[in-house]
Image (cartoon, rainbow, N blue to C red):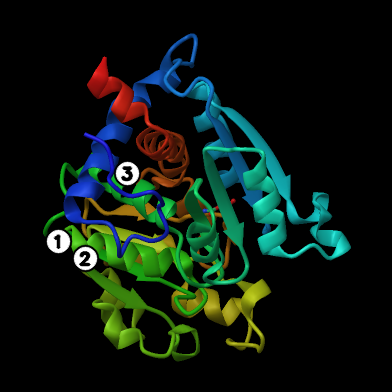
Amino acid sequence: MGLSKKDILDVDSLSVDEIQTILDTADGLKEISSRPIKKVPTLRGKTVILFFHEPSTRTRMSFDIAAKRLSADSISITAGSSSMVKGETLIDTAKNIEAMTPDIIVIRHASSGAPYLLAKMLSSAIINAGDGMHAHPTQALLDMMTVREKKGRLEGLRIAIIGDIAHSRVARSNVAGFTKMGAAVCLAGPPTMLPYGVDSLGAHVTHDMDEAIEGADVIMMLRIQKERQKHFLFPTEREYAKRYGLSPERLKNAGPDVLIMHPGPLNRGVEISPQIADGPYSLILDQVANGVALRMSLLYLLGGGARHADRD
Ligand code: CP
């Protein structure tokens, strides 16, 4: 089964069946990364452009690796290395990219909505790799894949997401995804780091981190995004770590099978202590590994892999 849509722009517009198809396909493709020769010919002849206007380690590399493992040709372009530094607009740049007939364009941009604009204007498939503070659907999908792999289900789980919710596209996409799949999400953070309208997201909201942790099956810690904060939102990092950092002492309030997640990059010693990040409950590197399989799944489903498989 393939996906009927041209683009992946957010989790909100994916149905439960579509999310399940994406996660099941990722589960099936994951095994390719442990083969001696990590490559299948499925997307041979397809071209994937990685158009990143913001820095990225995990998302960009995993899309690049995913494309190569499916035998697609992948080409990276960053804002600093493109003619956008000479004043070319996003739309002109995108039209020029499309003139070279790519099949899929993966875009990360600081402006919320940039991938939607490209999806409307271009016939290539567009994948949102993070737009401003709005959405990061592929991160949420890989997070759901990782939790489902470890817990065997998503329905009925309690997910605590803690930290700088206001600036987090990861939090928004994860609330949309986990609630859609039947989990209950609790958001916790200082009042200055909860966005306007947070109550309408469909999650329980608290300022008390211990309340969020109690009984949680999964604790997802978020990075303080200093680069997006226009004002000081907390007195000192030490004060923040004391009230909202995940430490071994604090974890004692969580259940015995709790899983710890973080999308990265980490501010070690601020939102998460090194003992927790590197400890036995941490799924942080599992998330990164699953990021490759999940992005292979999206490239496969949008790039026509499923159509070829159905036909063959
Ligand atoms: N989680 C995530 O999006 O990481 P990068 O910014 O390194 O891609």
- Residue at the left extreme of this rendering: 156
Q: Residue at x 48, y 55 (%)?
A: 263
- Residue 225's place in the image compared with 269, above or below, is below
Can you tell which mark lies on residue 146?
Answer: 3
Q: Position of residue 168 (x, y in %)?
A: 48, 70
Q: Are marks 2 and 3 in contact (CB under 8 Å)?
A: no
Q: Nearer the viewer, residue 137 or 182?
A: 137
Spatial CA span between label 3 and label 1: 16 Å
- The disc, 2 or 3, on the residue closer to the chain's N-terminal end is 3
Left or right placement of residue 142 versus residue 238 in this view: left
Q: Are marks 1 and 2 in contact (CB under 8 Å)?
A: yes
Left or right placement of residue 56 versus residue 33 in this view: right
In the image, the residue with mark 2 has its CB under 8 Å from the nearest atom of ligand 1: no
Q: Nearer the viewer, residue 303 or 95?
A: 95
Q: Residue at x 37, y 31 (%)?
A: 304
Q: Secondary structure at mark 2?
A: helix
Q: Secondary structure at mark 3?
A: helix
Q: Position of residue 76 (x, y in %)?
A: 68, 40
List the residue tagged with mark 2. 179
Q: Residue at x 30, y 50 (%)?
A: 144
Left or right placement of residue 236 versus residue 214 in this view: right
Q: Position of residue 67 (x, y in %)?
A: 52, 30
Q: Nearer the viewer, mark 2 or mark 3?
A: 2
User: Looking at numbered disc 1 in the image, what kind of residue is underneath it?
Assistant: Gly
List the residue tagged with mark 1. 182
The quadrant of the picture occupied by the C terminus is top left
